[in-house]
């Protein structure tokens, strides 16, 4: 049995480099990990007034999806040195209502990427600040700030750079180890 990993992509656009990265990783075969993208595109903006007995369907579906997964991998670009609002919105929706944070205790990792050189360092670390409050044990080393990411993929989504491919393989390996260290043994595992 593998650990299930929810992949949350911080960009909503169809041609997103972050989505290409997510698709690339989802298509790899990992011995211990099964990755699945959980879409955040349909989540309306968080509004506490809508936190009634019947919150929006899309919120409920998102919360249920995260609850079922063993771990979460965030793949995000950087908007104005922080996380895109759509990603922060998904984080907020999953964290609420008070006492029902679906992210709590789930091991996490962050891959940030940018066509620029700094690899979305700012977004990566702003997100980490939220994950501390959500009580998610988040992989610290290795870190993944992927710069120059426009050059990484062919139009078909193949990753061209062997060095980055190897680095990501090591990153995912470390994440698998991190998840097993932070997950209570389950029957059959
Ligand atoms: C950006 N971009 C950007 N890049 C960066 O490295 N640091 C930043 O602070 C910003 N800020 C920013 C703000 C806004 C509103 C937009 C639309 C873009 C550029 C960004 O990295 C680039 O558009 C990426 O390609 C977006 O990620 P996806 O959609 O390709 O995953």
Image: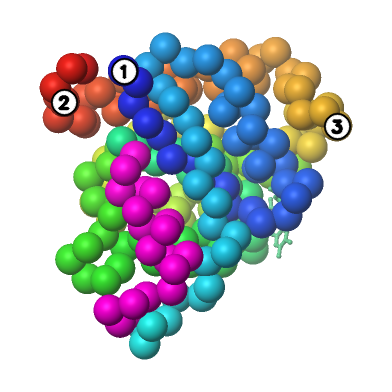
Q: Counting residues from the N terminus, which is met first, the one under dot 2 or under dot 1?
A: 1
Q: Nearer the viewer, residue 41 or 113?
A: 41
Q: Give the image quarter of residue 18.
A: top right
Assess disc 1: are there few (<14), some (14-19) or many (≥20) residues with their C-alpha within 10 Å of its C-alpha.
few
Q: Nearer the viewer, residue 177 or 70?
A: 70
> SS of the residue at dot 3?
loop
Q: Is residue 110 left or right of residue 75?
A: left
Does 59 sit above or below residue 160? below
Residue at the farthest bottom position: 49
Q: Quadrant of the C terminus?
A: top left
> SS of the residue at dot 1?
loop
Q: Is residue 58 magenta?
A: yes
Q: Is residue 117 visible?
A: no
Residue 59, percent from left and from top: 42, 66
Tell me the tag on residue 155.
3
- How far apart marks 2 and 3 lie (CA) works out to 41 Å
Q: Residue at x 31, y 36 (%)?
A: 70
The residue mark sitting in front, 2 or 3, is 2
Looking at the magenta stretch, what is its main secondary structure?
helix
Q: Is residue 87 magenta?
A: no
Q: Which residues are magenta?
A: 51-69
Q: Residue at x 51, y 75 (%)?
A: 45
- How far apart marks 2 and 1 lie (CA) works out to 10 Å
Does 85 sit above or below residue 10? below
Tell me the tag on residue 1.
1
Q: Do callouts 2 and 1 mark residues in contact (Cβ within 8 Å)?
A: yes
- How far apart marks 3 and 1 lie (CA) works out to 34 Å
Q: Is residue 4 left or right of residue 160?
A: left
Q: Give the image quarter of residue 40.
A: bottom right
Instruction: Name the residue beneath numbered marker 2.
Output: 186
């Amino acid at each position: 049995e593998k650990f299930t990993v929810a992949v949350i992509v911080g960009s909503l656009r169809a041609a997103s480099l972050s989505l290409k990265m997510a698709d690339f990783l989802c298509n790899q075969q990992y011995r211990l990990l099964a990755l699945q993208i959980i879409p955040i595109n349909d989540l309306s903006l968080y509004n506490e007034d809508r936190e009634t007995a019947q919150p929006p369907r899309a919120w409920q579906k998102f919360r249920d999806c995260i609850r079922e997964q063993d771990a979460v991998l965030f793949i995000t670009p950087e908007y104005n040195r922080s996380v895109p609002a759509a990603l922060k919105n998904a984080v907020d929706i999953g964290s609420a209502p008070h006492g029902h944070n679906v992210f709590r205790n789930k091991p996490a990792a962050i891959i940030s990427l940018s066509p620029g050189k700094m690899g979305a360092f700012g977004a990566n670390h702003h997100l980490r600040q939220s994950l501390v409050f959500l009580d998610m044990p988040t992989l610290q080393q290795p870190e993944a700030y992927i710069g120059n990411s426009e050059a990484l993929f062919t139009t078909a989504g193949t990753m061209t750079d062997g060095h980055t491919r190897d680095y990501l393989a090591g990153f995912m390996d470390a994440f698998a180890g991190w998840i097993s260290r932070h997950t209570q043994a389950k029957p059959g595992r």
